[in-house]
Amino acid sequence: MVNETIRNILARRSIRRFHDKPVEEDKVKLIIECAFAAPSAGNSRPAHFIVVDDKKLLSSLAKAHPFGKMLERCPLAIVVCGDPTQSEQASYYWEEDCSAAMENILLAAQALDLGSVWLGVQHAPAVELAVREFLKIPPHIKVLGIAALGYPAENKDPHEGILDGKVHLNQW
Ligand SMILES: Cc1cc2nc3c(=O)[nH]c(=O)nc-3n(C[C@H](O)[C@H](O)[C@H](O)COP(=O)(O)O)c2cc1C
């Protein structure tokens, strides 16, 4: 029953410590390809990705994000943005679409022996403003969040189990 994909999903944990080792370009490309493979409402695919490997920019992002200090010490970040103006579907669903893309980034990273953590931005206006400024993001584009990535320098147990009282059969 338990195959590679299931194992990968359960093994994904938030990694906040990274080795000082760059992520190979081929791996970055595969991760981005996986991000584009995420489902989106009406297949409108409103997500844009900013790959950040510039140390100064990573450091600026780390300073701007109250819970993103690991950005200072990771070799790579992918900023997931959405364009709600792209279509009517995107105007309603860009956040879900971008979240699906973000999850694919984290799972692809896990499958490629990388660690990652999702940093929320969309609901932190001051952080979003700073990210927007540092990365020259146009005003009509939204920032969903940032994935910090790199070779993991910490180990965590895989997920297991089903949470009590949170699964309902047929009716709540
Ligand atoms: C929308 C969202 C925002 C998050 N923001 C942060 C963050 O700002 N900083 C951080 O260290 N982790 C952040 N996380 C990671 C969560 O803390 C983490 O997923 C959770 O504790 C469960 O741990 P796991 O990912 O190892 O399963 C965020 C996760 C999500 C889904």
Image (cartoon, rainbow, N blue to C red):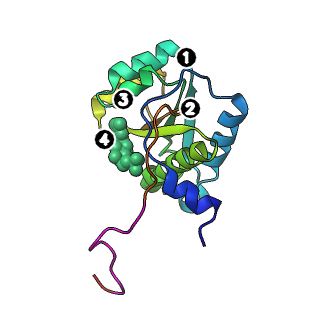
Mark 4, ligand 1, within 8 Å: the answer is no
Q: Which residue is denoted by mark 4 in the rendering?
A: 123
First to last magenta residue range: 160-170
Sequence-first tag of 2 and 1: 1
- Residue beneath disc 2: 151
Q: Residue furthest right?
A: 26
Q: Which badge, 3 or 2, comes first in the chain's sequence?
A: 3
Point 55% across, 16% down: residue? 54
Q: Report how far apart the C-alphas of labels 3 and 2 lie in the structure.
A: 17 Å
Asked whether the beta carbons under mark 1 and mark 3 sit within 8 Å of each other, the answer is no
Question: Which quadrant holds the C terminus?
Answer: bottom left
Q: Amino acid at mark 1?
A: Asp
Pointer 1 or 3: first along the chain: 1
Which of the two labelled residues, at mark 1 and mark 4, occupies the earlier sequence position?
A: 1
Measured as percent of width and height from the top left, residue 84 is found at 47, 46
Q: CA distance from mark 2 to mark 1?
A: 17 Å
Q: Position of residue 164 (x, y in %)?
A: 28, 71
* Mark positioned earlier in the residue sequence (2 or 4): 4
Q: Is residue 172 visible?
A: yes
Q: Is residue 162 magenta?
A: yes
